[in-house]
Amino acid sequence: MRAAYVHQPGPADTIVIGDMPTPDAGVGQCLVRVTVSAVNPIDTYVRGGLVAMNLPLPYIPGSDLAGVVEAVGEGVTGFAVGDRVWGSNQGLLGRQGTLAEYAAVDADLLYPIPEGVSDEIAAAGALVGVTAHLGLVREAQLKAGETILVVGGSGGVGSTVVQLAKALGAHVIATAGCDDRAEIARDAGADELIDYTIEDIGEAAKRLAPSGVNVWWDTRREPDLIQAVGAAAERGRIVVMAGRDAKPALPIGPFYVKGCHLLGFAMFKATAEEQRAAAEDLNRWLVSGEYHPRIAKTFALKEAAIAHTLQEAATIDRSATLAGKIIVKP
């Protein structure tokens, strides 16, 4: 099979396009013919060695995929040859990734693609959708009628959080730094917007939610916990899922007096059961239109290095050139 791979962790330009053995469907696995994969920041971190993991070498990056089941391994009962499926959590923790024509995937990390949902949308919404669901439902336990503030509401995860929070019945405030980004957050369902280039986010949050926000979701690499605690309601929940090297100050007094909770998580450490619960809701919202992943760029497999370079520019270099998901078609 054709695949994009690296011989050792390294820069995007070390990605090679070549032939690798087509994997077999092992016990509990499905062999999936990949029709679409998606590129995420974590894919570039692992490929580049910024996040150290034991990798099979040569290593194929990529967490997300959509495709068709080509073979079913021993013990698999939930899928059959010909089923359309999507999944995430590949390319991590010793697993090969999805930038290839085929992938052997544990069946408990695969989900059916609903009728009427394209492979492109299913792949684009995989990791970001499961991440947002875990943070909102498992961690923050967001309830209908509560107020959530999403810092970075136009980004890949941020705009997904906005959509899922609306599907859960919340009132959503989002931040954006320009008119185009504000439009993305508004399209995702944000009820109110804060332009952080002209107004302090914490002060704006107090103006828009005088009683405080129930959930503060921060996507920044440098979360501001002083802002978050200051804007939080009684028993407010603060979710962080970025900022690996950040060491923000935490105002202990108001944090414990308000009874706040600081919640951090990594999507790929969630159990298969937790991810499946997220996927079931995501499938329902994909069908209803409440969840509609935004695709920014589409590349061919031979352009995998370009796709990774673009993703790194958006996340590591913090460029404003990417407004949606990158997908790759073998």
Image (cartoon, rainbow, N blue to C red):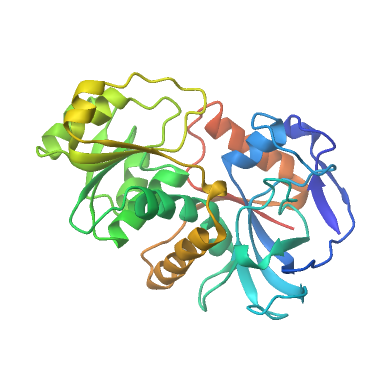
Q: Quadrant of the C terminus?
A: bottom right
Q: Is residue 223 left or right of residue 13?
A: left
- Name the spot of residue 11 as percent of width and height, x first: 73, 29
Question: Total label count?
Answer: 0
Whether 249 is drawn above or below 259: the answer is above
* Residue at (24% x, 29% y) in the render: 229
- Name the spot of residue 295 as percent of width and height, x first: 52, 53
- Name the spot of residue 71 as percent of width and height, x first: 78, 75
Whether 24 is drawn above or below 19: the answer is below
- Name the spot of residue 163 as percent of width and height, x first: 35, 55
| Residue closest to the eye, 184 or 134 | 134
Q: Is residue 197 visible?
A: no
* Residue at (84% x, 61% y) in the render: 23
Which quadrant of the figure has residue 61? Answer: top right
| Residue closest to the eye, 173 or 263 | 263
* Residue at (73% x, 50% y) in the render: 95
* Residue at (90% x, 57% y) in the render: 21
Q: Quadrant of the N terminus?
A: bottom right
